[in-house]
Amino acid sequence: MSLFAARLRNFRLERADRLPFGLLIGWLLAMISLPVSRWTFGEAATSVALSIGVIFQAAVGVAFLAQRWSTARIALTALIVVVIGWAVEWIGHRTGFPFGVYSYTERLQPQLGGVPLLIPLAWLMMLPPAWAVAFSLTQPLAAKPLLRRIAFIAASALAFTAWDLFLDPLLVSWDFWRWQDGGAYFGIPLSNYGGWLLTSALMTALTAPRADLPRRPFLFLYGATWFFMTGGVTLFWGLAGAGIVGSAAMGGFLAAALWFGRGREA
């Protein structure tokens, strides 16, 4: 205990690390408080608590990027992801392409064109962690730039879409949106996951993230999201099937990324 106390006293954050660390603590607290707020204040508090968590995680991601990327590069990346994220959801809930036929309820506010503004922010929130996974997975292809680029886009899309194996069943159960005809995956149509793969691949191709992405912090975010989603969906929210499948998918990508990325600078 004395050794731990001594290390704790000597712990100092560099000035550049203080903002990301503070935001990270805020996000972790928001994630922990989500089930508590739902139990304490009822379903009405769920959308507020969820929104706070998404905003904090997106802010953490931007703060991590700011340690390596210029302000202009971050702004352009965020603009591409948010605009495409909103546009594809606007097209999707009006036409059924590329996800399937669904509609948003009024529970997530504010909305623009019938699309909750939290949704494109969530795309921005989880894409950089998926990129970190993909960079680690494609490390063995470093000597083959073109092949690695193609594999990187595919791996990013798969690692990102694995998250939705948790997310869609959960948020449908909270009545944030509704699928017209249900679907084969716990009430979610398989076309939804095709849409996620297509959209996240397009975003990744257009933003063209490079290997200077701070990998370790984003792998931590991916892993922490996997941990919270596994516990929440499986244990707290009563969706054990989706929790087990989502945990296996995200956990598999995380384990592979840690294996292939071991011993390398990030």
Image: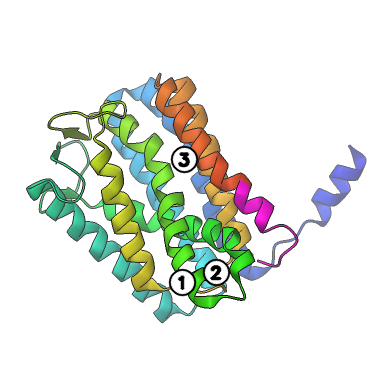
- Secondary structure at badge 1 equals loop
How many neighbours does mark 3 have within 10 angstroms: few (below 14), some (14-19), or many (20 or more)? many
Q: Which mark is residue 71?
A: none
Q: Is residue 66 above or below residue 60?
A: below
Q: Amino acid at mark 3?
A: Ala
Calculate the distance from the C-alpha at mark 1 to the C-alpha at mark 2: 7 Å
The picture places residue 159, in percent across and down from the top left corner, at 46, 50
Q: Is residue 215 magenta?
A: no
Q: Which residue is mark 2?
A: 213
- C-beta proximity under 8 Å, tags 2 and 3: no
Q: Are marks 1 and 2 in contact (CB under 8 Å)?
A: yes
Provide the residue span drawn in magenta: 256-266
Q: Amino acid at mark 1?
A: Pro
Mark found first going from the N terminus, 3 or 1: 3
Q: Position of residue 90 (x, y in %)?
A: 14, 54
Up/down of 263 relative to 256, above or below: below
Name the foreground residue: 150 vs 18. Answer: 150
Q: Amino acid at mark 2?
A: Leu
Q: Is residue 2 above or below residue 204?
A: above
Do labels 3 and 1 touch, CB within 8 Å? Answer: no
**Which residue is drawn at the image coordinates 72% and 57% (left, top)?**
262
Check the image and tell me how it is coloured.
rainbow
| Element on which disc 2 rests | loop
Regarding residue 32, the answer to whether it shows in the image is: no
Mark closer to the observer (2, 3):
2
Between 28 and 91, the residue placed more toward the observer is 91
The secondary element bearing badge 3 is classed as helix
Depth order, front residue of 79/240: 240
Q: Which residue is depicted at the point 60% across and 58% down?
A: 217
| Numbered badge on residue 209 | 1
Q: Which mark is residue 30?
A: 3
